[in-house]
């Protein structure tokens, strides 16, 4: 459920029903996520962000990064232009319980990183706040259920042993 403001939880601090989100990544990561039974926090947010830091999870802190914007997930699945993911990666379709969701209003470190210490379960940044697309970070992987997997290029993925 999404509000007229675009916030997946309606407004900051509200608890929500489950909402559909996406997570784009490499096929290798999709296989690891599925084989381990779900997301592992030690690996989540491991893509580096040149805008904020070279550290993992530096954009919104540790957690699983998801988006309600399929275009963003598809972009993440492809990987960086200088090192694209084999077969174009893939997208996990998710059912996410955002819980108590914090709205990130600026790109300042205090705004981006303090939400979990304040008791929020997730943080949501609208389009343009921390990047081109909206993004959400969920602190507890148990709040996420994988409902489907979409491979960018099924034939290529099969040819390299992923499907």
Image: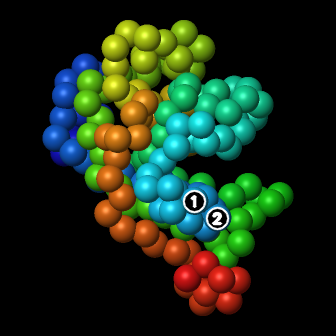
Which residue occupies 20% across, 24% down? 14
Please identify the quarter of the rendering in which residue 153 is found. bottom right
Q: Marks 2 and 1, how far apart in space?
A: 6 Å
Q: Quadrant of the C terminus?
A: bottom right
Q: Is residue 137 above or below residue 93?
A: above
Pick the residue in front: 163 or 80: 163
Residue 73 percent across, percent down from the top left: 51, 56
Q: Is residue 83 above or below residue 123?
A: below
Relative side of 46 to 140, left or right: right
Q: The residue tagged with tag 1: helix, strand or loop?
A: helix
The residue where tag 2 is placed is: 28
Q: Which mark is residue 32?
A: 1
Q: Are marks 2 and 1 in contact (CB under 8 Å)?
A: yes
Query: Depth-wise, is mark 2 or mark 1 nearer the camera?
Result: 1
Q: Is residue 141 visible?
A: yes
Q: Residue furthest front?
A: 36
Pick the residue in front: 38 or 112: 38
Q: Is residue 34 above or below residue 7?
A: below
Q: Is residue 136 above or below residue 112?
A: below
Which residue occupies 65% across, 41% down? 46
Q: Quadrant of the N terminus?
A: top left
Residue 60 percent across, percent down from the top left: 54, 27
């Amino acid at each position: 459920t999404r509000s007229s403001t675009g916030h997946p939880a309606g407004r900051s601090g509200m608890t929500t029903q489950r909402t559909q989100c996406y997570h784009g990544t490499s096929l290798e990561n999709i296989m690891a996520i599925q084989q381990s039974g779900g997301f592992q926090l030690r690996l989540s947010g491991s893509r580096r962000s040149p805008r904020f830091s070279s550290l993992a999870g530096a954009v919104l802190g540790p957690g699983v990064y998801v988006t309600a914007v399929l275009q963003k997930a598809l972009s993440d699945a492809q990987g960086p232009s200088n090192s694209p993911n084999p077969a174009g990666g893939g997208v996990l379709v998710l059912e996410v319980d955002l819980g108590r969701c914090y709205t990130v209003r600026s790109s300042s470190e205090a705004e981006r990183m303090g939400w979990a210490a304040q008791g929020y379960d997730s943080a949501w940044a609208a389009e343009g706040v921390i990047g081109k697309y909206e993004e959400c970070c969920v602190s507890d992987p148990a709040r996420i259920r994988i409902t489907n997997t979409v491979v960018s290029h099924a034939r290529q993925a099969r040819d390299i042993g992923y499907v």
